[in-house]
Image (spheres, rainbow, N blue to C red):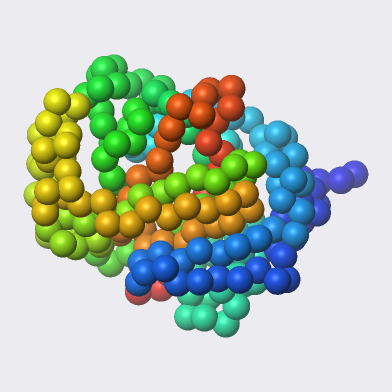
Amino acid sequence: MKTVDEIWDWAAEVNPDVQIEELAEYVSIARNVYKYPDRVLEFQKLLTKWESADGDKPGVNSLALPAWTGSNIINNVFGDHDENDYILEESKSEFIYFYKNNKKKFETDPLSEVLYTGNCLLPHHDVIDDDTKVCIGLVNLNHKSIKTGFWSFNNEVLLYEKDIDYYDDYIEEINLDNYHEKTNNGILDQILTVEYHFNDAIFYNARALHNPVIDDFYTRENPRMTLRFYFPYES
């Protein structure tokens, strides 16, 4: 009897020639992550998909994978770096599917009023607690390049507890009518856009303000597909 564990091991072998490059203090890019990336695409077809409902994440996501499924990325991409002190039992892996005008399952507000979901026109951050250190990994599984934007708020890319209320209050004031006035204005600025190709990945500090770039190419039937890893570390 073949288990899903064995299929995952068959699919997710890391390319021994993977190269990682630091783009900024808060984000790195890895190229040609998996040895057989099309096998990873086949694997995700085995998983049940759910409408996203938790947190602020829109679109569709897969059932969560066991925590250990991300360990080969850390062990083989980051090697002997300090990042190996991650907490395996708190790690998370899942496939994420974004598309134009996506939303959460129980979203009731018009998409035009929810700029951090919908088409993800505003950035968000993935960790709040100052005592928590987390790395996020996103593998591009589209046969075309995708982009992720990184932003600063009052000249800071990494958001800590002392600034969260100020940030939340600021973005609550932004709508489609004043979007261009309220962004790239010295307060909330997009400072870096990372483009990465099929089977490339970015790894970034979960405190970093960021947004997926979703264009008209991505539909519910043909979504922007990524494999997302959440790696918490010892403080």
Please name the residue shown 49% across and 58% down the image: 202
Please name the residue shown 56% across and 39% down the image: 225
- In the image, residue 32 lies at what x, y percent? 65, 60
Q: Is residue 205 above or below residue 76?
A: above
Quadrant of the rendering where the C terminus is positioned: bottom left
171 or 87, which is in the foreground?
171
- In the image, residue 214 lies at what x, y percent? 42, 35
Q: Is residue 85 above or below residue 174?
A: below
Q: Quadrant of residue 30?
A: bottom right
Side (left or right) of 225 relative to 72 = left
Please name the residue shown 16% across and 62% down the image: 155
- In the image, residue 135 lies at what x, y percent? 43, 62
Q: Is residue 59 visible?
A: no
Q: Residue furthest right?
A: 1
- In the image, residue 217 lies at what x, y percent? 51, 29
Side (left or right) of 151 relative to 222 = left
Q: Is residue 118 above or below residue 235?
A: above
Q: Is residue 76 visible?
A: yes
Side (left or right) of 32 relative to 162 = right
Please name the residue shown 33% across and 57% down the image: 192
Side (left or right) of 44 relative to 177 = right
Quadrant of the rendering where the N terminus is positioned: top right
Q: Is residue 176 above or below residue 8?
A: above
